[in-house]
Amino acid sequence: MKEALYYKKLKENAVNCNLCPTKCVIKQGDFGNCGARKNIDGRLYSLVYGKPVSTAIDPIEKKPLYHFLPGSNSLSVGTLGCNLHCLHCQNYDISQADADESSSREILPKDLIDIAVENGCKSISYTYNEPTIFFEYVLETAKLARKKGIKNIMVTNGYINKEPLKELYPLIDAANIDLKSIDEDFYKNICKVRLKPVLDSIKMIHGMDTWIEVTNLLIPGHNDSDEQIKKLVGWVKKNLGERVPLHFSAFFPTYNLLDAPRTSPDRMLKAKEIALKQGLKHVYLGNVSLPGSGDTKCPKCDRVLVERGRFEVKRNDIKKGSCPYCNEEIDGLF
Ligand code: SF4
């Protein structure tokens, strides 16, 4: 257990957590809404510090990040808990569980660095559940990783308050941010939170030195109409620019959202067509088997520069961050 950052004490041993926009008021003995922070005798503790429940060495393409060290491995780490409660969560078994004070498996930040180095990982990804809720663990690990030249990656829902964001993200080299929809009602009904803090976070992170890519999961009947896709793409283009990679991901029924069907390949292709037509330069399709849908093309001469299979790079022709055919710079870290 580690005493949490970003909270204040209230009367009668209650505390107020200010890590994410939920801003929980937590009575003595209770958990925060994320299940990862607990008020013990009037102090707030992170129960997940050094207590990962998922660790794996993943290709970075699985995060997904396609413009950041393609073909490299990333040590991926996640804990219990989440500050969102999405009906369609694909990792609900860990994200919707309260942390256990008695859990004995401990991997401290310095251990994560050793594992990353031993396995030739160029980065550590904070992922699987929402890394914001294991903030203290990410922060300490990220500081050590920086010293060893290992990159830090957040795979995040963006639901974090401004002050902790400002402290953490200067240490974060890349982030894949899940923009679940551009509609307030979707966030309210499906995720039980508000959209605006997510949009604010994405804009703030984009204004920092962190490389960002955006993922949008297309759920039939909930957020996949042409109008919704156009609106989301328009927001991305206006606020992040036409070269920020956008990953559309296909939905499959899971957890508490079982009445929507899988996203069809045709809908995925239509989303890509809409995004390209609106001017985005790097649009990818995930969770679906469509040849070429993960390839990176030069935004100027349109040649395929990075050819991908499922989570693997088959060919990467980018030279010193540029297209070898027309010298156009390709945004990201290659
Ligand atoms: S991080 Fe957890 S405890 Fe803190 S405000 Fe968010 S949901 Fe509540």
Image (spheres, rainbow, N blue to C red):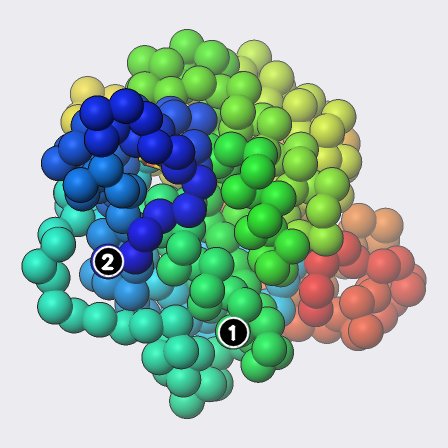
Q: Quadrant of residue 276?
A: top right
SS at circle 1: helix
Is 74 positioned to the left or the right of 14 in the image? right
Q: Quadrant of residue 207?
A: top right
The image's mark for residue 144 is 1
Q: On the image, numbered disc 2 is attached to which residue?
A: 1
SS at circle 2: loop
Is 205 positioned to the left or the right of 253 in the image? right
In this view, which residue lies farthest toward the left?
102
In this view, which residue lies farthest toward the right?
326
Q: Residue at x 47, y 74 (%)?
A: 73
Residue 56 horizontal/vertical position (percent): 31, 70
Precedes in sequence: disc 2 or disc 1:
2
Quadrant holding the N terminus: bottom left
Crowding at mark 1 (Cα within 10 Å: few <14, some 14-19, many 20+): some
Residue 274 horizontal/vertical position (percent): 63, 26
Q: Residue at x 11, y 61 (%)?
A: 103
* Above or below for 89 versus 302: above
Question: Looking at the picture, which amino acid does disc 2 mark?
Answer: Met
Q: Residue at x 72, y 35 (%)?
A: 240
Q: Is residue 272 visible?
A: no
Q: Quadrant of ligand 1?
A: top left
Q: Label 2 vs label 1: CA separation?
A: 19 Å
